[in-house]
Amino acid sequence: MDNGQIARVIREVGEYIQVDEGLSFRARAYDRAAETIESLVEPLTDTYAKGGMTALMGIKGIGRGLGDALEEIITTGKSSLHEELKRALPIDLPALNSVQGLGPQKIRVLYKELKIKNLEDLERAATAGQIRVLTGFGEKSEEKILRGVEFLKRGAGRMLLGDVLPWGRNLEKELLKLKGVRKATLAGSARRRRETVGDLDMLVVADDASPVMDYFIAMPDVEEILANGPTKSAVRLKNGLQVDLRVVPAESYGAALNYFTGSRDHNIVLRQIAQDKGLKLNEYGLFHGDVAIAGFTEEGIYAALGLEFVPPELRENGGEVELARDSALPVLIGYSDLCGDLQVQTSWTDGVHSIDEMAEAAMAAGLDYMVVTDHTKRLAMMGGLDEKKIRLQMKEIDAVNERLMSAGKKFKVLKGSECDILKDGSLDLPDDVLCELDVVGVSIHSYFDLPRDEQTTRVIKAITNPHADIFFHPTARKINARPACDFDMEAVLDAAAKAGTVMEVDAFPDRLDLSAEYIRMCVKRGIKLAIDSDAHDRAHFSVLEYGIAQARRGWAQKEDIVNAWPVEKMLGMLKKSA
Ligand code: DGT
Ligand code: CA
Ligand code: CA
Ligand code: ZN
């Protein structure tokens, strides 16, 4: 088990305790321990292997009780306390917890007063008006709960790309190690880098399919075998993800890859083009009568159809085939094109690592600069910075830059802020501080559901503030957890274009905000974009890849992305408009 998995169990134990006994000392201790574990660099299993219980208890906030629980999880993969609590409280805590606005405290009340155990109970009680009368709830929160349930039902079953792509890539690697396996490639929506995927589709070319199938159905993560045939198998993993695997002959690999990458609508247009040429396209190849004229490679298929190769991220039938026919596809922003990161949190607020540590990690990720953008004072719970603290931080950044320079490093740390947008659209720091910053990001962390007109006015006021450079995670959505803020995007983009405000593509897998559709609107209007990690930990620079994928799905080119530019050019663009 990795630290993330261990932390999840510990956090859930804390939540069950909270439902059981309220926000007790014990409940808090588990919650804090989960947070600590998530931020550890060394795998806990290593810590334990090296130093046993003593090493576990040497970690901040881990006492005897938690140490015992951790030891049990590490050695057996389970926690008996967890199992016991689940038995004693027969509620679907993860599901209830994922409803926006519900946490363990409220779930406790709902369970005690109305015996609500799962989403169905919750929906029924909310529809019947039973929740509004409970203490701590009202008509508004009842409505919000209903909307939350509705939202979850819509996203049901789709997992975040960021949660499944690393697993899929690992499977590619493992399959390639098997004897006789020549190719293993992830197709489907994962290859198109959709924000969420319904299932994974793996394609394999092998001399002999049976060892591949044997390996596939016996993987340790498999919960259930859904199909097991000579060339096609499907499994469901313990985390609920379904994975399909097909073994195809080498001469069909390109055709199968094209077919199973989709999208369905893109494929339909390709097949039509083939027909118009008197050819036939399917997952086995491109045929003239019975003769295959392409099929080994995808490139070969597109070429034989008279088309430019279409990057998978564009294959959504959004006009890409027409442009491919004219050899006029955009040259998309590349996966190694970023030179900087314009949104990074540090341990000055809710980040885990220091400015120095984040700079080291950004350098290791191949970047030349990063902007430190800690939260501002309204986010008191996260230790948001006030005027005084942010001035201290600016001094610290000067010192970090001096250290970097004397060590002969070219890397630059810039001064910035993730400045909170207040309810009325004004900013959470005074003008004289904002003036001194290199990069001012503004973002919404409260009043997500203002009426549309009011939200639009609020946003436009904030992003046209002369100090605002970038609108961070503009819609503030969390995929599968919180809907996008409702405002008039057309009007906001018009305002951004006029003010020269940059729009962000927050790369965090559960944000991916802006969406591809909105990115494309920006590109069409000539509005510049920034692809940022929103890193809260030095490991998070790896998420930039998802932001780049999202920007590619929005048809963005290098010129559209300000942090694909050298630092002077990037700053020049921001300051010109300020
Ligand atoms: P997902 O899994 O819902 O995130 O989306 P996809 O695109 O991965 O869809 P999936 O897994 O059902 O099928 C993988 C690809 O296979 C899909 O993108 C296109 C192709 N495909 C599957 N069924 C059909 C079909 O009935 N017609 C056509 N033209 N293509 C299909
Ligand atoms: Ca799929
Ligand atoms: Ca599938
Ligand atoms: Zn934020």
Image (cartoon, rainbow, N blue to C red):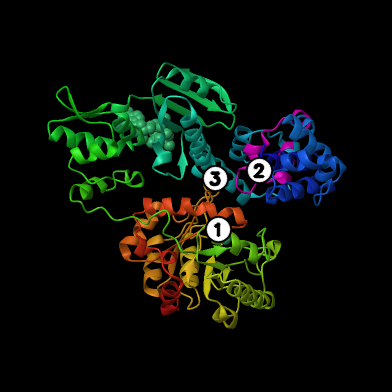
Check disc 2 and give the amino acid type.
Answer: Gly
**Could one spot residue 174 in this view of the protein?**
yes
- Residue sitting at 84 percent across and 40 percent down? 53
Residue 576 image offset from top left, x and y in percent: 41, 79
The nearer-to-camera label among 3 and 2 is 2
Residue 89 image position (x, y, % from top left): 75, 32
Q: Quadrant of residue 283?
A: top left
Left or right position of 494 against 376: left
Q: Under tag 3, what secondary structure? A: helix
Name the dominant secondary structure of the magenta segment: helix
Left of 522 or right of it: where is 578?
right
Question: Can you tell which of label 1 and label 2 is closer to the viewer?
Answer: 1
> Which one is in front, 96 or 322?
322
Q: How far apart, in angstroms, are the residues tagged by discs 1 and 3?
A: 43 Å
Quadrant of the image where one finds ligand 3? top left
**1 or 2: tag closer to the N-terminus:** 2
**Kind of residue indicated by mark 3:** Arg
Residue displayed at 70% across by 65% down: 383
- Quarter of image, res 109: top right
Q: Which residues are magenta?
A: 84-111
The relative height of residue 537 versus residue 260 in the rendered view (above or below) is below
Residue, disc 1 = 364
User: Which of marks 2 and 3 precedes in the sequence?
Assistant: 2
Residue that badge 2 annotates: 4
Q: Amino acid at mark 1?
A: Ala
Q: Residue furthest bottom?
A: 432
Q: Helix, strand, or loop for circle 1? A: helix
